[in-house]
């Protein structure tokens, strides 16, 4: 996590790990290699906003999509972000309660309607399974910060999915996000990485992502029975899923933690 990323000529980045980090706009030939296998549980892949927009980010915003390759030219990590007009009069500069879903909707809306962006939001940092635990997430976060700054933006925001929140789904996210170690840094490792990089925890996005489905769908996605009314704890979910037997549906509303990075 101590690796530093330096902006090089033309947005090229280098690191002490001998990785080459550039934007997809600079290396469009790597577009087909972006989507290495991920480890997300099946239910997390059912967000409708994600289905509609997330996969379009590299094509629509290649200059905000970062790729890390090893000396053999293999893609080992990616970082996707989107520009949007947070300070538009109708949005008022307030980070949205609907977090991850909302920034994607705003970014694509703004691009389609020619609205000038003033902020960049991180959307994902993904590291190939065999390279996890080597500090690449911090490396890509720093590259994302540098890329946004190099393009004239004053801030990068991030709807962060805390790494270990799923271990205690009943804990309110506001309480979890405030927890710190003796050194004052967040207990959660991914929040800690953001704060070390210069981010400030600002707020909780209580409805950052919403996933709904019939009870049969949830049984297929999770292998759980979904046979009782009320809250159901699902492995890897940050909060419990609300199950309605009477109405035959269940809904997962995921909170994220807003972190703001001022780019100096």
Image (tube, rainbow, N blue to C red):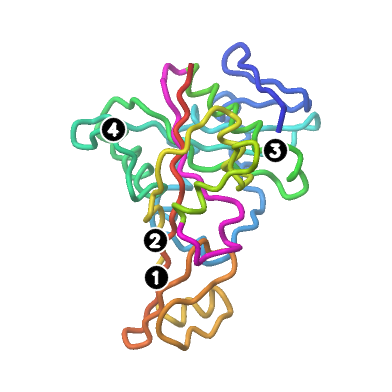
What residue sits right under mark 4 in the picture?
Answer: 93
The image shows residue 94, relative to residue 218, as above or below, that is: above
Q: Earlier in the sequence, mark 4 or mark 3?
A: 3
Relative depth, front residue between 264 and 183:
183
State the extent of the magenta-drawn residues as a range.
151-172
Element on which disc 3 rests:
strand
Marks 4 and 3 sit apart, C-alpha to C-alpha, by 35 Å
Whether residue 93 sits left or right of residue 54 in the image: it is: left
Q: Which mark is residue 251?
A: 1
Give the distance between the C-alpha atoms of the residues marked 2 and 1, in whole angstroms. 7 Å
Query: What residue does disc 3 label?
Result: 75
Question: Disc 4 vs disc 3: which is toward the camera?
Answer: 4
Q: CA distance from mark 2 to mark 4?
A: 23 Å
What is the number of the mark on residue 210?
Answer: 2
Q: Is residue 187 left or right of residue 254?
A: right
Residue at image coords 42%, 16%: 152
Q: Quote the CA–CA distance across marks 3 and 2.
A: 30 Å
What residue sits 66% from the left and 53% below the top?
Answer: 37
Q: Residues within 10 Å of mark 1 (few under 14, many from 20)?
A: some
Where does residue 216 sit, x and y in percent of width and height? Answer: 46, 82
Residue 67 in percent (x, y) is at: 62, 33
Q: Earlier in the sequence, mark 2 or mark 1?
A: 2
Which sits earlier in the primary sequence, circle 2 or circle 4?
Answer: 4
Mark 1 vs mark 3: in front: 1
Q: Quadrant of residue 17?
A: top right
């Amino acid at each position: 996590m101590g690796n530093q990323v330096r902006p090089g000529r033309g947005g090229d980045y280098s690191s002490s790990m001998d990785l080459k980090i550039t934007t997809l706009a600079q290396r469009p030939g790597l577009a087909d290699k972006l989507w290495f296998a991920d480890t997300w549980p099946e239910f997390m892949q059912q967000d409708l906003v994600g289905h509609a927009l997330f996969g379009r980010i590299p094509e629509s915003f290649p200059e905000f999509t970062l790729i890390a390759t090893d000396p053999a030219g293999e893609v080992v990590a990616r970082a996707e972000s989107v520009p949007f007009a947070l300070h538009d009069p109708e949005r008022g500069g307030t980070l949205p309660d609907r977090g991850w879903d909302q920034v994607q909707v705003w970014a694509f809306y703004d691009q389609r309607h020619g609205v000038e962006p003033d902020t960049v939001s991180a959307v994902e940092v993904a590291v190939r399974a065999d390279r996890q635990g080597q500090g690449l997430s911090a490396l890509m976060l720093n590259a994302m910060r540098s890329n946004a700054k190099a393009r004239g933006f004053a801030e990068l925001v991030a709807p962060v999915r805390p790494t270990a929140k799923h271990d205690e789904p009943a804990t309110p996210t506001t309480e979890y996000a405030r927890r710190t170690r003796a050194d004052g840094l967040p207990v959660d490792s991914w929040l800690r990485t953001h704060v070390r990089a210069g981010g400030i925890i600002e707020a909780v996005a209580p409805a950052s992502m919403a996933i709904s489905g019939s009870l049969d769908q949830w049984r297929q996605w999770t292998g759980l029975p979904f046979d009782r009314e009320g809250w159901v704890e699902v492995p890897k979910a940050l909060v419990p899923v609300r199950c309605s037997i009477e109405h035959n549906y269940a809904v997962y509303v995921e909170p994220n933690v807003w972190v703001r990075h001022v780019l100096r």
